[in-house]
Image: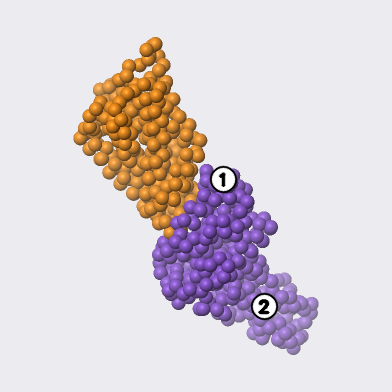
Chain colours: A orange, B purple
Amino acid sequence: MLGYLRLEVRRTLRDRGFVIFGIGMPVLMYVLMTNIGAGPGGADMGWKTASMVGMAAYGALGAAIGTGTGVAEDKQLGWLRQLRITPMGPLRAVVGRGLTGSVTVLPAIVAVLLVGALVNGIRMPAWQWAALAGLLWLGTAPFTLLGLGNGYRLSAQSTGVVNTGCMLLLSIVGGLWFPAELFPGWLRALSAWTPGNRFAELGRSVTEGGAPSLAAVAVLAAWLAVFGTYAVYAYRRAARTV
Amino acid sequence: MTPGTTPETTPGRARQTAQVSPVGRGGDGTAVAFSGVTRSYGAVRAVDGIDLRIAAGETVALLGRNGAGKSTTLNMLLGLLPPSSGTVRLFGGEPETAVRAGRVGAMLQDGKAIPRVTVRELVGFVAATYPRPMDVAEALELAGLAEFAGRRVDRLSGGQAQRVRFAVALAGNPDLLVLDEPTAALDVEARRTFWRAMRAYARRGNTIVFSTHYLEEADDHADRIVVIDRGRVVADGSGEAIKRRAGGSLVSFDLAGAPTAPLSTLPGVHSVEVRGDRALLRTADSDATVLALAGLGLVRGLEVTAASLEDAFLTLTSPDGANADAPNHDAPNHDALKETA
């Protein structure tokens, strides 16, 4: 399974689309959003920090969901079928894929955090940086499962579209691009129930020096269960035809 | 190695590179056993009752037209597809068990190259999932890929990609190698190389099952040919036996108005076909048939030709539904053999 993880991480990092859109985009958007139109002194540190968390979360969320897009492609190429006749076994193949997602989310998180520290001059104690990166990393699990579910259930073309749609919807409604405080009341209320919003909250609470709220953890856990069930269902269905 | 001579003594566990090391590993020397296997897709019966036993160490060709049920059969063999009824056993157990134990390698029909990985990485990864893999360099060498090891799989030609799939199938050093139409995308030269490699692998005592619709391939490279038509085994034996089965020779002559009814009872005759005014007799013993014909005075334009494997194949899998698996049939024409199953 480690071999599979290594193979898939390699394949993902060699994907130019992934590097440009998965890592480059969040970094670029972060730099733009915090340095353009903000006047000579630049944006205030509060926004720079909030946007850093938002963009790191956005990049991580995209990479996590994108794991499933790769699965759909492999399914179409007959590679998942080929894997089924290796001794690796289907369960380890799925877990390996999930772990791949957990590795490929890291570059986006690290890149945005680095830009925050080096370009935007954000200063925090080391433990906060570590906790921030760690929580953003752990918090991607529901999104990886959502992407995998789509990947197993849908064709390669549909998965690409649906996953991109999910990523944008969850990012925007979740307040990763623009803070949810700017949303109209009804959308803000809705946003609080979405996984994207609570995912970013994990990070934000750390930058504010606190622990994530119980509500945030509960909402994310609920989505983890929902998406996990969906992924298992999709995989079971696919296993009959893959 | 021929199946009839030593199947029980070489259960085919060759772990050494160059020589056979016949280490018995469970079972009675049976690599593959199908009993009463059927598979339906909706109302369509793709596989319609297959019974088949393949001994360890045999090289067997599944020969049939497109859509005859070969791929469905192989997918059930690999445990990728559950049979609708009947059982499939590999090395005495469930196919999944054999697959999980690393005893099976396969080249599937529709596999395509996965992007962004080199040949060596891919083959190395697959090898590492098996308990006793082949050395990666050796697998690449066998598949004729040594010079492409560092190339990305998605940047190879169709023929090269096909070799990668062969290397993937070999990489785990499996006891049973399953190849679904392995030469479909290969040119003549690549084909020759491929079969040389396959035979080398077979010589190590491994069991090989491949499907093809090329008759020559089946005849040239398999110890045994299993002809599949409409989801059933319609013939099973060596290339020679298949030819004999469909009538070893073809005796033809001008009927000139003679009655056809007695022809099927002549010595050696399997089947009688009438084309225009000419009668074509398939016979296992052309000498006896010709003598009998001479006795009847039916020698006008008499010709005796050896039936080609092509003839045999067409006879066995006649598209009008002729079914040649009724033992010792001597029905006068195909119409009388409409499939009843």
Q: Residue at x 44, y 51 (%)?
A: A3
Q: Is the residue marked by circle 1 packed among few (<14), some (14-19), or many (20+) residues within 10 Å?
A: some
Foreground of the two, A16 or B54 = A16
Mark 1 or mark 2, which has the lower sequence index?
A: 1
Quarter-of-image position of residue B41: bottom left
Quarter-of-image position of residue B18: bottom right
Q: Nearer the viewer, mark 1 or mark 2?
A: 1
Return the mark for residue B248.
Answer: 2
Quarter of the image with the N terminus of chain B in it: bottom right
Residue sitting farthest toward the right:
B301
Residue sitting farthest toward the front:
A126
In the rendered view, would you say B189 is above or below A53?
A: below
Quarter-of-image position of residue A164: top left
Q: Residue at x 44, y 25 (%)?
A: A28
Instruction: Classify residue A184 as left or right of residue B40.
Output: left
Say which element carries label 2: loop
Q: Residue at x 37, y 25 (%)?
A: A117
Q: Measured from the top left, where is residue B290 in percent x and y?
A: 73, 84
Amino acid at pointer 2: Gly
Amino acid at pointer 1: Arg
Residue sitting farthest toward the left:
A214
Say which element carries label 1: loop
**Subunit of label 1:** B
> Can residue A15 be seen in the rendering of this structure?
yes
Foreground of the two, A191 or A218 = A218
**Subunit of label 2:** B
Q: Measured from the top left, where is residue A17 in percent x and y?
A: 49, 35
Q: Dot 1 corresponds to which residue?
A: B152
